[in-house]
Image (cartoon, rainbow, N blue to C red):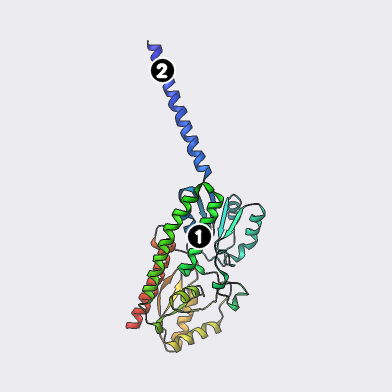
């Protein structure tokens, strides 16, 4: 009898072990089925995680405070990109120093997608100082960034047809949030008198924002931070600030503050005091886990900072 009990116990333990092994194998299989994605900027990483949900694994290359104009891929980045199923990047020459790497990945058969490919080119700015390239900062017009969401959705669906409905549902929900965000930005912008809607930052990242929400935008360095601002650039912008009686200027999280501080000093030398209105997120989002660490939170932070500074200064 004792022998029978012992044998039964052995069989039960073996059975449980086999079931546990099967469950682990199934779990590992499901994890392996996830699409392995690498995204460049935080804004694109955010889209991909939201639309892809639990069917994807996303690695973002550029964290808070990183300037994509100047970003050079490390050996680790190249290794990460080489192991990806799908690569999402902004395009429009934003990640200019990575162009050759993207081409190499395409030649290796890795699906490489610029999320701006679906945007009507007639809607893009073509600043003459940007060497014939389009202005890449399209995410500051929430309606244009919706196109990027759709491109990510369609690319994921093509890569993973079984998840089509899932991706469409996630994208539809997020697009509604972006529509609400667009209305919020317009409403807040309307709180500033038209003659006070002048946004001055370190570089010209906000032209789509200005066009969409009624702001005149001036950047010290132009479209790309690769171009160095000279003494004359500083003096010209300082003269504009004094002439237009601009009350506040703004620093950017991904551009050293010394550039805007130089402008402020030049303005002061002309007998006029311009305040620092706060820090804006331009080419990179805030820290993970903070409101500014998401695209929607970043945009809300920016418009709130701009409006609150210009309204406050306008009332003083």
In the depicted structure, whether residue 68 falls above or below residue 22? below
In the depicted structure, whether residue 49 falls above or below residue 201? above
Residue 74 pos. (x, y %): 59, 57
Q: Which residue is mark 2?
A: 8
Q: Which residue is mark 1?
A: 150
Q: Nearer the viewer, residue 47 or 144?
A: 144
Residue at point 41% right, 68% down?
182
Residue at point 45% right, 27% down?
17
Residue 238 pos. (x, y %): 48, 85
In the depicted structure, whether residue 35 falls above or below residue 220? above
| Residue closest to the far left | 315
Mark 1–mark 2 Cα distance, whole angstroms, equals 58 Å
| Residue closest to the far right | 107
Residue 243 pos. (x, y %): 45, 89
Q: Can residue 287 be seen here? A: no
- State which quarter of the image contains the C terminus: bottom left
Q: In the image, 251: left or right of 228?
A: left
Q: Nearer the viewer, residue 196 or 252?
A: 196
């Amino acid at each position: 009898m004792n022998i029978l009990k012992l044998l039964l116990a052995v069989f039960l333990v073996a059975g449980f072990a086999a079931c546990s092994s099967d469950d682990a194998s199934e779990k590992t299989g499901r994890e392996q089925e996830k699409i392995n994605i690498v995204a460049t900027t935080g804004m694109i990483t955010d889209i991909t995680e939201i639309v892809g949900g639990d069917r994807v694994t996303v690695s973002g290359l550029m964290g808070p405070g990183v300037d994509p104009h100047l970003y050079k891929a490390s050996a680790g980045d190249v290794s990460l990109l080489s192991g990806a199923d799908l690569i999402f990047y902004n395009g429009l020459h934003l990640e200019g120093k990575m162009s050759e790497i993207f081409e190499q990945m395409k030649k290796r058969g890795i699906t490489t997608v610029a999320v701006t490919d679906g945007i009507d080119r007639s809607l893009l700015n073509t600043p003459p100082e940007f060497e014939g390239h389009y202005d890449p900062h399209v995410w500051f017009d929430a309606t244009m960034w919706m196109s990027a969401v759709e491109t990510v959705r369609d690319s994921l669906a093509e890569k993973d047809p079984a998840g089509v409905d899932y991706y469409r549902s996630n994208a539809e929900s997020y697009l509604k949030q972006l529509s609400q965000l667009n209305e919020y930005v317009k409403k807040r912008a309307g709180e500033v008198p038209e003659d006070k809607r002048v946004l001055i930052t370190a570089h010209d990242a906000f032209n789509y924002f200005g066009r969409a929400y009624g702001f005149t935008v001036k950047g010290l360095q132009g479209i790309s931070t690769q171009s160095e601002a000279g003494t004359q650039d500083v003096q010209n912008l300082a003269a504009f600030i004094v002439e237009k009686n601009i009350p506040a200027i703004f620093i950017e999280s991904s551009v050293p503050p010394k550039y805007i501080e130089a402008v402020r000093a030049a303005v002061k030398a002309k007998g006029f005091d311009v305040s620092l209105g706060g820090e804006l997120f331009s080419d990179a989002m805030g820290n993970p886990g903070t409101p500014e660490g998401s695209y929607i939170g970043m945009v809300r932070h920016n418009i709130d900072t701009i409006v609150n500074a210009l309204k406050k200064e306008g009332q003083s």
